[in-house]
Image (cartoon, rainbow, N blue to C red):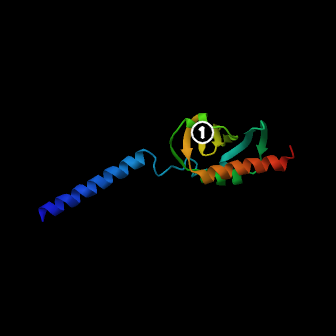
Amino acid sequence: MKHKLFLATAGICLALAILLICLSQGVFGKRPFKDIDGADIVSATVELMPPDVELEISDTEELAELLRSVVIYREDDSYKDYAGQAAVFTLIMEDGTAVEITDYTPFVIIDGVGYKAKYEPCQALNSYANALLSQSGI
């Protein structure tokens, strides 16, 4: 009986240790903008590269909704080895801080720090930026 109790306790401790390691490594992901609201953003722009065009974003609520869905995992600078379109969002927040968020699917770079990110929210941000470009008529 004591042997079974010891094995059960050891198994639970091992499972908790594995869970803590996974959480510390960002295996399950984090949502860095989960609390952002459109009213928190005083102004926002997006620069699409290519075609090297910068646009003003007037609907900050739609942008905030997309940012709330962004999930990042571990830090990863391998985005430097990729080729593709980057959408650089520059936000001026209500408290006066500036935040630069680069969507480079499947990566998100926040203020110069790259992260592997969940694909679908990244793609949604990229589509949003390209829709703004189409609507601008440029």
Q: What residue is drawn where x is 32% and y is 50%?
A: 17
Question: In the image as oriented, which residue stretches furthest toward the right?
Answer: 137
Q: Is residue 117 left or right of residue 42?
A: left
From this view, report whether residue 2 is shown above or below residue 52.
below
What is the crowding at mark 1: few (fewer than 14 residues within 10 Å), some, or many (at least 20)?
many
Question: In the image as oriented, which residue stretches furthest toward the left?
Answer: 2
Q: Quadrant of the N terminus?
A: bottom left
Q: Is residue 18 left or right of residue 121?
A: left
- Three-letter amino acid code of the residue under disc 1: Ile
Q: Is residue 55 left or right of residue 30?
A: right
Residue 52 location, quadrant: top right
Q: What residue is drawn where x is 72% and y is 43%?
A: 44
Q: Position of residue 83 (x, y in %)?
A: 66, 37
Q: How many marks?
A: 1
Q: What residue is drawn where x is 73% and y is 41%?
A: 46
Question: In the image as oriented, which residue stretches furthest toward the bottom?
Answer: 1
Q: Position of residue 76 (x, y in %)?
A: 52, 38
- In this orientation, does residue 37 appear? no
Instruction: Assign a secondary structure to mark 1.
Output: strand
Q: Is residue 90 left or right of residue 27?
A: right
Residue bearing mark 1: 109
Q: Quadrant of the C terminus?
A: top right
Q: Position of residue 66 (x, y in %)?
A: 65, 53
- In this orientation, does residue 100 appear? yes
Q: What residue is drawn where x is 22% and y is 58%?
A: 9
Q: Position of residue 26 (x, y in %)?
A: 46, 46
